[in-house]
Each structure stands twice: as C-alpha cells, then as structure tokens.
Amino acid sequence: MKFALIGNCAYQALIDDRANIIWLCWPRFDSSFVFGALLDPDKGGDFAVIPEGDHYETEQHYLPNTNVLRTVFHSAAGSFEVIDFAPRFRQYDRSFKPTSLMRRVRRLSGEPRLRVRIKPTINYGQIAPASYVASNHIRWNVTEAQLRLTTSVPLTYIVESRPFLLEKDAYFALTWGSPLEAPLEETVDTFLTRTRAYWERWVKHTAMPGCFQPEVIRSALALKLHQFEDTGAITAASTTSLPEEHGAGRNWDYRFCWLRDSYFTLRAMRRLGHFEETEGFVGFLKNVVEAHPERLQPVFSISGEDRLTEVELDHLAGYMGNRPVRAGNAAYYQIQNDVYGEMLGAIAPLLLDIRFQDHGGADHTVRVVRRLLGRIERVMEEPDAGIWEYRGAERVHTFSLLLHWTGGMIARRIGAAVSDQALSGYGQAIMDRARSIIEEKCYNGEFYVDSTSTNNPDASLLMMVNLGYLDPRSERAQRHVRGLARELGQTKGLVQRYRHNDDFGQSTSTFTVCGFWYAEALARLGFLDEAEHACQELISHANHVGLFSEDIDPQTGEQLGNFPQTYSHVGLINAAFAISPFPEGLAEH
C-alpha cells in the first residue's frame, strides 16, 4: 500500500506514490468520497498530476516532523515536486482547519511538461457532477455544498487534461463549502508555512522513547489525524472496505469511533505527552454515556450517532477487485462488554492526573465512573461478540473479563484519589470477581484461552501482561506469553489474532498490532533485546512513508486491511516505550 495520509483533524486524504489523490471523503471522515479511485479506478474519481510520457520515476516523503507530503517526479524532460497538505494551525486561539486541500507544483530542473486530471464524484461514485468554468476556478454542482478548484493553471488545460510546460509554480486550492476568497499563491504559501510550523511545534512537544524515535513520530502524527476534533471522536482507520485477505469478504468500514480503539489510542497519546486528545474524547464519551444510560454499544459515528446501518455498494469494483464495498458497520448492534472497562480508563486521567483537576466537573465524572462500574457488575458473565467482533455465537470472552478487572482496578484508584472508600471497595470487588472467573475457567495450565467455554489461543490476551493483570516477574506470565507466541507467531515478528474458524472460515493474515503487543509483552517480561528485535522486524513491514495497515500477509509481506490503522501505530508506540521509556542520556539509573 504505497499511500500517504494527509489531514487536519477535520478530514483525511490518501495520496499514492505518484501524487494521485485517490481517497478523499468530504466534508467529514465518514462522508461519501469525492475521490475514491482507491475502491474503483473507473468510477471513483481522482486528482492527479501526471508528467508527459510514460517513463518517469517518483520519490515520496513527508517533510520532517509534519503531515505535509512531498512527491518528486524525475523524467528525461526534467524534475518537479508536488507538495500536498491540509491547512492546520492556530488562529484566534482556535484551530484553523478548513475543508480545503492545497497543492503546490514546483519545477526543480529541466523543462518538465505535465497535465492535471481532476474527476470528482459524489454519492460513492454514482454521480459525476457537472462542472462550470469561471474566471480562475472550476466549480462542480453538488447538493450539499460548493466544490471548487481555484488554480493558477489555465483552466482549459485542466478541463481538457492537456499537457503544459511547467515554467512557474502551479497552485491549487480545492475547497468544499466556503471557496477561497483571497490571493491564491500568497494564501497557499502562507498556509504551507504555518501548517508546517504547527506540526513541527506539535512534534517538539511530544515525549520520545529511547528507541525507534522516527517511527514513533510518524505514528504519533498519524494518530493525531484520526481524531475528529469537532466532537473529539477518534476513528479506527481512514478507509472502508480494504480487504483483510484477498477474496475472503472481510471488508469493513472503519471510519467510525470504536470505544475500545479510542481508549488504546489515548493511552499511547498520553505516553507521548499529549492530553488535549483525551479532553476532547472524554467530552464525546460523556455525551454518549448520557444518551445511552443502560448500555454502551461498541462503536458510534463521529457525531455520536448510534445507527451505522451497513450497506453494500455493489456498483463499486472494490480495492484490487475485492468486493463487497461496504458503508456503515453492523458491529454497532453487537454486545462487546469490554467497552466499560476501557471507558473507565479513558476517563481516569480527569481524576487521577493533577493537570486536569482544575477543570471542574469532578462530581459528574465520578457519577459516570459509578455508572460504568455498575454496568461491569451486571454484564460480568454475559456472553458477547468479543474484541474480534464475531458475528456468530457469543461467548464469555476472556478479554472482556480482563477489561472488567482493569475497570475495577481503575475505579479502585479513582476512589482512593477522591477519598471515596465505597467506590474503592466497589472497584476491588469487581477485580476479585473478574479474577476468580478468569483463573477458574480461562487457564489451561499453559496459557489463558479465549473464553470460558473454548480452549483457543487468542493474541489479545498478550494484554494480560501489558495491562498489569499478570505479574511480569512470574513464571506464569512468561509461560503464557511464550505459549501464545508458539501457537500464533509467524515469520518476521508477525502474529495472528487466532487460528480457529470464525464466521468466514479460517483467517490467514496476521494482525499488525498483535506483533507489537508481543514485543511490548517481551519488554515487560524483561527480554529487552528480544523485544527490540521483534519490533524492528515489524517496522520493516511499514510502507515507504512509515505507515501501517491493519493486516499483513505472512507469506508475501503485503499490507492488507484498512489504512492507516490506528491500532497498528498505537502498538508501535507502546512497544517502543516499553523497551526504552526514556531518550538516551535521560534514563534513570
């Protein structure tokens, strides 16, 4: 997957290694795409800058410590660069993040000729809107808003996709809603400078581990782009329907807010020293909890909508011919009881971190904690779909029990922090009950298994070490981790989720984050060299700009599944901090 991600926390776009914008959903993360060639090269639409002739090479990278993308083209006629970015910076004490994508094309050498192709679509590629040419822009009729391309390139060349000589810088501002009503070239250059400075400053305020720092920075920047800042919701990935395996039908829409994924993302962001993401998400969570006092579903839209009706878009060919293409996700009606413990973890910093304690609202937050703890008590032994969202039979999954224990542990700590002995005792009782069930029904003498009624290895239970359930100094912890690795490990640090049949048969791909969970567990067990080696092997699977998808084919090394996957980058960050929590020279002795 030779794609790069740009965005500004209002929208996201994927650009391939030839500077073709192949994925752009507007105006929100979960809207229909404007450019969707990723899922159908013919119907999806794209925005391409193409050198004249068939013989050229490209190189692509991010400007250091930013989400600004640079693609360089080399041909016999000459070289040029394309800079792509989504404007984002601070203005009037607020985040300025317009629904606008900007491109600047600059000649580097020779006399390159190129052409520009832009083919927007709406309603998931079912409609190619009519275009209208004005004095210095092209406008497309869309029902929701105004879609406009303002450019310094002669419009005739764009409309006819005609090659032209790149004699001076070419500027493009594609906008949704409010058009650009300002000098084009000055605005693009100014926005580029300010956007670059924003990301560089953000990275400077990011805590670093002692190893894999470039990879951690890229992962942090990618995670930041998956928070929809308007509501605080965090999405699992930028895309829909990229297959976990070719031809298996495991194609899902991940442009929504899974509460579980959000919790683990926030844990990683706090390790990096970023807290505004937690404040934003907790605001989103409190609204969700108030709207759903009886039960939390596992996934919501980025606005908090609870119905994510899943439909198949049969008119689209699918990524590399993989159908179906889906919009929406039926997981919203599943029972996944681990969410209550994870939401307690998401809320915890507001009560346990002194930096949040002057912000008010503590009484309301404690009430939310009690409500979530009460839900854990009621669903403790209720069968659910589990972390892997099985669509078949429900079971009492060990991972859910682990998060019940975790939620109790967090509530106990919160009770102590706010001098509420009853809350602490309630949390301890939940911990004791969850541990009792796990130890009596989920341990096979070698490792912990996936549920109280089955005996399958499950990579999510590596988190029994990483979340602190198992004492890393104990023989049982080592035996558990080694046993899961033996059952589920593949080559080059890759680890499968499980090997038993699910609703679609037996999965053959590996789940990227499981490998990082294993590396983190090794580090917590004290096998630092082994953990670093495992992490290095996993990092070798990253794409050309350092991004990870959801899955990796263990035979070919091909990245599969939705992209970029927040889970994968969360796993990398946590593993790096477990291996070496302090930069060189700052470690404690």
Image (tube, helix red, strand yellow):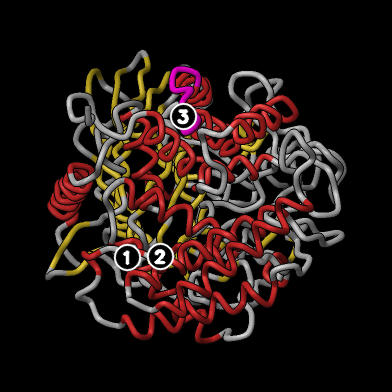
Q: Residues within 10 Å of mark 1 (few under 14, many from 20)?
A: some
Q: CA distance from mark 3 to mark 1?
A: 26 Å
Q: Name the image quarter holding the N terminus.
A: top right
* Three-letter residue code for mark 1: Leu
* 527 magenta-colored: yes
Q: Residues within 10 Å of mark 2 (few under 14, many from 20)?
A: many
Q: Which residue is mark 2?
A: 413
Determine contact: label 1, label 2, CB under 8 Å: yes
* 179 magenta-colored: no
* Three-letter residue code for mark 3: Ala
Q: Quadrant of residue 557?
A: top right
- Our reading of the magenta stretch's main secondary structure is helix
Q: Name the image quarter holding the C terminus.
A: top left
Residue 582 or 422: which is nearer the viewer? 422
Residue 412 or 248: which is nearer the viewer? 412
Left or right: where 416 falls relative to 48: left
* Three-letter residue code for mark 2: Arg
Q: Residues within 10 Å of mark 3 (few under 14, many from 20)?
A: many
SS at mark 3 in the image: helix
Q: Which residue is mark 3?
A: 523
Q: Which residues are magenta?
A: 523-530
- The spot of residue 165 in percent (x, y) is 29, 30
- The spot of residue 582 in percent (x, y) is 26, 33
Of mark 1 and mark 2, the one earlier in the sequence is 1
Q: Which residue is mark 1?
A: 352
